[in-house]
Image (spheres, rainbow, N blue to C red):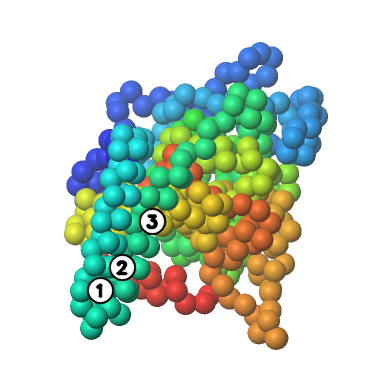
Amino acid sequence: MAVLDTTASRGTSAEILAALAEAEAREALLFTEPVNPPHRNGPDDQLSARARPDLRRRRGRHGAVRPDRQVRVAPRKGPRAALAGGYDIPRIEMRRRCPWVWVRFAVLATAAGFARHVLIAADDPGARTIQALWAAGFLWMGSQWVLSWLDRPRKVTRAEQWELDRLLVVVNIPLYNEDPVILDRVLYALSRQTRRPNRIEVVDDGSTVDYGQVRDHWQMQLGTALRWVRQANGGKKHAQVNTFRDARDADIIVTIDSDTALEERALAEGLKPFADPRVQSVAGMETAANSQANWLTRTASARSMFFQLTACGVLSAMGEILVNRGAFALYRASLLREITPAYLEETFLGHRIRLGDDAALTLFARGRGRTVQQPSAWSFTMYPEKLSHHFRQWIRWMRPR
């Protein structure tokens, strides 16, 4: 049985977003943690080696020329937020208690349910059709439950971790009329990662909201490690492609929504599956930041959690995740640069294909290798608190864009 341990604040979503961090919130700047002399893990070290020719350059197993390895740092060290002293970002750890006991129980329960429907069908010929359907459905759900236990967090050796630390990671945040407090929380969470990104790119897709205070604060804190771009409204795909084309030196591109705050170890854990060169994309886990707001957010969060741990767990164990979660996903940058023309302009019999962005990127990744999820890489996203908003969101997801 999977148990999630969280230290989440309770109350409304507004209280969650406005919650101040502990009074001892540190003033240290992002990317200013001391490293072994004579180098510092500063903004310049995070950029491409072209910007710092004095750095040693190495070629790793992943093929890209890299400056010295990215140094991982302790969590919860970083700058203050722009609109608050800080935000309470919960810590999540998924623990499997007595796994083989639960697997055996699942197998026995599935077998018993299947046998029951078979016996009923044998005794009542008139009910054979419906009982056969029930038996097949029961067997399908039970086998899915059992097989989902094969999906485990990817672990790495010290040598693999050394290679992963040298990857250049760029985070893309498409932005359109998001609440400035929520965006501030997203950037705050990124600044406190145990494995910090080399660069963060916020692409404002023609918003009418004024983000001046948030932008100025984080540009001062992050310096050249933050790139803030504004473009004419073109949709999420165009906002993502802006980064795909710009980040020519990136090894991994992370896509997150503008309302999604990452748990402090999310990037470090999300990178681990890339130790396998066959893996082309990694889906992060998603839960509601505002799950305690009302019955709708609690229900949606529980449904999403069950789906990720069972159905997606089975697909991930086979390396065949069908659709990455748009809130938080990681891709090999070489893949994204290669498929950019098709991502924007692909046609079939003269008609432009308008697959959803997450489905399209995952499809391209599956065509090149394995697509998995990492059960130890968590994110917190804002779920709709009203039915009208909930339905609009699902309609937007299901229709071509």
**Percent position of residue 221, x then y:** 52, 35
* Marks 1 & 2, CB-CB < 8 Å contact: yes
Residue under pointer 2:
135
The amino acid type found where label 3 is placed reads: Ser
Relative image position of residue 339 (x, y in whole percent) = 70, 62
Query: Looking at the figure, which quarter contains the N terminus?
Result: top left
Nearest the eye: 109 or 172? 109
Image x and y of residue 82, in percent: 41, 41
SS state under label 1: helix
Q: Which mark is residue 1?
A: none
Residue contact between numbered discs 1 and 3, judged by CB atoms under 8 Å:
no
In terms of sequence position, does the residue under pointer 1 or pointer 2 come before the other? 1
Q: Is residue 378 visible?
A: yes
Residue visible at 28% across and 78% down in the picture: 128
Q: Between label 3 and label 2, give the one nearer the viewer.
A: 2
What amino acid is labelled 1 in the image? Ala
Q: Residue at x 73, y 44 (%)?
A: 249
Distance from Cα at disc 1 to Cα at disc 2: 10 Å
Circle on res. 121? 1
Residue 198 x, y percent position in the rendering: 61, 37
Residue situated in front as seen by the camera: 162 or 366: 366
Label 3 – label 2 distance at C-alpha? 12 Å
Q: Which residue is mark 3?
A: 143
